[in-house]
Amino acid sequence: MKILFLTLCIATAAALSVSAGDTPAEKAFVEKYKTAYEANDKATLESFLYKEGAHPMALEFFTMMMTEGAGGKISSIELTDLSPEEMKKAAGTQPGPDGKMTKMPLKPTKKLKVTVETKDANGSGTETTSRMVAEKDGKFVIPVPVPAK
């Protein structure tokens, strides 16, 4: 009975780790992002952006969003699969910062969810942001919208 229980526990743990999708590439991406963010390494944070053909105003906005708050302490970070609804939204067009339609240059399949703790004289709080992530040439990138044609 104990052997059956132990086998069942090991099988469940293995199934959970596989479903979490933590491949070595995903782990490396998340760790590199966290390290760069906490070190306020803006150059590395900006290097995650896939800028090819980017809408100029969207690029400016994404660059600002990537580096805003950098240097803070990340309390939680995870890379998860997009839901079917999120995938559908990512495949469509969206209004850009100037009102013109944009689209993603690459098909996002993941979402990077980052929670940062803040503490100052006024108190403490948390802020959570999500960014769509795609793969390009075996590398995880955060695509910046391009003008829709």
Image (cartoon, rainbow, N blue to C red):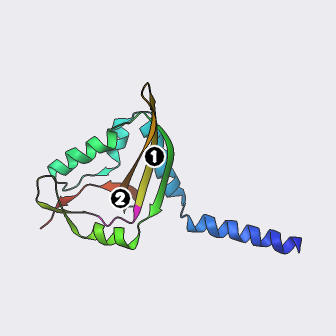
- On screen, residue 116 versus residue 16, left or right, reads left
Query: From the viewer's perspective, is 24 left or right of 15?
Result: left
What secondary structure is marked by label 1?
strand
Along the viewing direction, whichever of 57 and 126 lies nearer the viewer:
126
Residue 15: give x, y in percent of width and height.
Answer: 64, 70
Q: Nearer the viewer, mark 2 or mark 1?
A: 1
* Highlighted range, magenta: 105-110
Question: Which residue, given by chain and number where applicable, does mark 2 sit on?
Answer: 132
- Residue neighbourhood size for the residue with mark 1, other residues' Cα within 10 Å, grouped as few (<14), some (14–19), many (≥20): some
Question: Of residues 149 and 52, which is closer to you in this image?
Answer: 149
Name which quarter of the figure residue 46 lies in.
Answer: top left
What is the magenta segment's predominant secondary structure? loop
In front of the other: 104 or 72: 72
Q: Image point 16% across, 52% down: which residue?
A: 97
Whether the residues at callouts 2 and 1 have beta carbons within 8 Å, the answer is no
**The disc labelled 1 sits on which kind of residue?**
Thr
Earlier along the polypeptide chain: callout 2 or callout 1?
1
Q: Is residue 38 left or right of residue 23?
A: left
| Element on which disc 2 rests | strand
**Residue drawn where x is 41% and y is 62% of the image:** 110
| Above or below for 107 versus 112 | below
Question: x and y percent of residue 74 in the render?
Answer: 48, 41
Count of numbered tags: 2
Query: Toward which corner of the image does residue 145 lie, by quadrant?
Result: bottom left
Say which mark, if any, is on residue 115: 1
Q: Is residue 9 magenta?
A: no
Residue at the (43%, 24%) spot, across then down: 121
* Up-down relation of residue 131 to residue 68 (above or below): below
- Residue 33 is marked as none
Percent position of residue 135, x then y: 38, 62
